[in-house]
C-alpha cells in the first residue's frame, strides 16, 4: 500500500489536517517553485523565448495524464465555472431541452444553467438527494423517467461535494449516450483520486481545478473538450487562440482563423508562470502515485474512520455509495454549532457542508491522524452531550 507522503508537505506532526476537499496544502516542491517563480517575475528579462511555451505544454500534459486525454484536447483555464460557461457557449440546446442537475450540487456545474434557463427555455430537472445515498441509481432513474422528454444534457459532479456520494460515471455516461444527451462532468473531487479516462467515458466536457486534490494553487483549472465541439467559438478572444496574430510579425492580424484543438479555449492572460509550474508539480506527483494506489490508501483511512466512529450516534453513508477519500457524517439532531471550532482548537481540521461534517484525508495523512480525530471527536461529542 502507498505509504503516507507527509514528508513532502509542511504539516507539523501535531496538526491533523483532514480537509483536502476544501484546500489541498501545497507540497514543499510547489512552494519552492512558487518562490522561484515570483523571483523570476521580478527579473523578466531573464526569461528565454521558449519559456512560456514549455510552461503551457508541461501543465497541459500533466492535466491530460490525469484524465486519459490527449494534451491537445485540454484547455488552460481559471476555474470550473469558466469551463462550464465555455461549454454553455458551445452547446446549442433547443428550447424545452431537459437539463439534469444534482440536488444540492456545487454551484459551479449548476448556476450557469439556472441562469440560462428562462431566456433559453430550458427545463431544469434537479435530481433529489436519494435517501439511501445512491446518486448513481437516482441519476439513472431520472434519465429513464417515463412520460417526459429524454434529457439533452447532464451537468453533474463526479462526486457529490457535500456528502462524498460517488457517481458511476461509465454507467451514467452510457445511459446518456443512449438517449443522445450531452455530458458535462465537474471532476473536481475525482481527477487524480479515482480512475478517469475520457477516451472510454467520452464526455462532451470535463473540468477540474488544482487547488484541492491535485495539490496546486488557486486560479488554475483545466477543461477537456471533446473533438466534436472543438470548432466552436471560445468564451474569450485571444491572440494565441488564432493562427496568426503576433506582435513580432510585420502584419499583426495576419490570420485570425482559430487554432486547431482545445488551445483556442485557453483563458485570457494564461501567462501565470508562477502558478502554472506549481500546478504542474502537484499534478505530476498525483499522477506518479496513481489513482489506484491513492484510492486504496484513502479507502483504508476512511474505513478506519468509519470503524472508529461506530456507536457515536452519527450517520455514515454505506461504503458502496461513497467515494473512497471522503467520509461525510450526519447528525440526527443537527451538527452541533461549536463542534468544528472545538476540533480546530485541538488542531483537528475538517469542514461543515450542508449540515454534515465532511472529512477528507489525502496522502499526507496517516493512521495516527485518523486515530487522533476519532479520539478528539469522541471526547467532544461526549462533552457536548453532557
Image: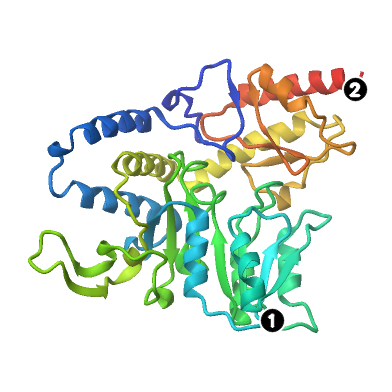
Between residue 180 and residue 99, name the one nearer to us: 99
- Residue that appears at 69% across and 24% down: 373
Between residue 176 and residue 51, name the one nearer to us: 51
Q: Are marks 2 and 1 in contact (CB under 8 Å)?
A: no
Asked if residue 306 can be seen in this view, the reply is: yes
Between residue 187 and residue 4, name the one nearer to us: 187
Residue assigned mark 1? 150
Horizontal side, residue 201 vs residue 370: left or right: left
Between residue 57 and residue 362, name the one nearer to us: 57
The percent coordinates of residue 332 (x first, y second) are 89, 39
Q: Quadrant of residue 284?
A: top left
Question: From what the image shows, is residue 366 above or below residue 254?
Answer: above
- Residue that appears at 58% across and 78% down: 177
Horizontal side, residue 2 vs residue 239: left or right: right
Sequence-earlier tag: 2 or 1:
1
Residue assigned mark 2? 385
Q: Quadrant of residue 346?
A: top right
- Residue that appears at 25% across and 63% down: 239
Q: Residues within 10 Å of mark 1 (few under 14, many from 20)?
A: many
Query: On the rendered image, what quadrant is the C terminus found in?
Result: top right
Question: From what the image shows, is residue 167 above or below residue 125?
Answer: above
Alpha-carbon distance for marks 2 and 1? 49 Å
Question: From what the image shows, is residue 372 above or below residue 130?
Answer: above
Describe the element under mark 2 as helix, strand or loop: helix
The percent coordinates of residue 61 (x first, y second) are 33, 54
Amino acid at each position: 500500500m502507498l505509504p503516507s507522503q507527509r514528508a513532502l508537505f509542511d504539516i507539523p506532526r501535531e496538526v491533523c489536517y483532514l480537509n483536502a476537499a476544501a484546500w489541498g496544502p501545497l507540497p514543499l516542491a510547489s512552494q519552492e517553485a512558487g518562490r522561484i517563480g515570483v523571483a523570476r517575475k521580478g527579473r523578466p528579462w531573464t526569461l528565454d523565448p521558449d519559456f512560456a511555451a514549455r510552461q503551457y505544454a508541461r501543465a497541459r500534459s500533466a492535466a491530460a495524464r490525469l484524465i486519459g486525454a490527449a494534451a491537445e484536447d485540454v484547455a488552460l483555464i481559471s476555474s470550473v465555472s469558466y469551463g462550464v460557461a465555455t461549454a454553455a457557449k458551445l452547446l446549442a440546446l433547443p428550447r424545452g431541452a431537459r437539463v439534469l442537475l444534482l440536488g444540492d450540487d456545487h454551484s459551479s456545474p449548476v448556476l450557469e444553467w439556472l441562469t440560462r434557463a428562462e431566456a433559453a427555455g430550458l427545463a431544469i430537472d434537479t435530481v433529489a438527494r436519494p435517501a439511501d445515498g445512491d446518486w448513481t441509481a437516482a441519476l439513472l432513474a431520472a434519465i429513464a423517467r417515463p412520460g417526459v422528454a429524454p434529457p439533452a444534457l447532464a451537468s453533474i459532479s463526479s462526486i457529490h461535494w457535500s456528502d462524498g456520494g460517488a457517481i458511476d460515471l461509465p454507467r451514467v455516461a452510457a445511459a446518456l449516450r443512449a438517449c443522445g444527451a450531452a455530458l458535462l462532468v465537474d471532476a473536481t473531487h475525482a481527477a487524480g483520486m479515482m480512475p478517469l479516462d475520457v477516451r472510454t467515458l467520452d464526455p462532451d466536457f470535463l473540468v477540474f481545478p488544482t487547488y484541492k486534490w491535485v495539490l496546486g494553487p488557486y486560479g488554475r483549472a483545466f477543461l477537456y473538450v471533446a473533438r466534436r465541439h472543438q470548432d466552436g467559438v471560445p468564451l474569450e478572444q485571444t491572440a494565441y487562440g488564432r493562427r496568426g496574430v503576433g506582435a513580432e510579425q510585420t502584419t499583426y492580424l495576419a490570420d485570425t482563423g482559430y487554432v486547431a484543438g482545445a488551445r483556442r479555449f485557453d483563458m485570457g492572460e494564461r501567462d501565470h508562470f508562477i502558478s502554472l509550474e506549481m500546478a504542474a508539480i502537484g499534478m505530476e506527483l498525483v499522477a506518479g502515485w496513481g489513482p489506484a494506489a491513492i484510492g486504496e490508501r484513502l479507502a483504508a483511512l476512511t474505513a478506519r474512520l468509519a470503524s472508529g466512529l461506530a456507536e457515536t450516534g452519527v450517520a455514515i453513508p454505506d461504503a458502496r455509495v461513497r467515494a473512497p477519500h471522503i467520509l461525510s457524517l450526519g447528525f440526527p439532531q443537527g451538527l452541533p454549532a461549536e463542534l468544528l471550532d472545538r476540533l480546530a482548537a485541538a488542531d483537528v481540521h475538517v469542514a461543515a457542508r450542508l449540515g454534515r461534517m465532511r472529512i477528507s484525508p489525502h496522502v499526507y495523512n496517516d493512521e495516527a491522524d485518523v486515530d487522533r480525530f476519532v479520539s478528539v471527536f469522541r471526547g467532544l461529542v461526549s462533552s457536548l452531550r453532557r
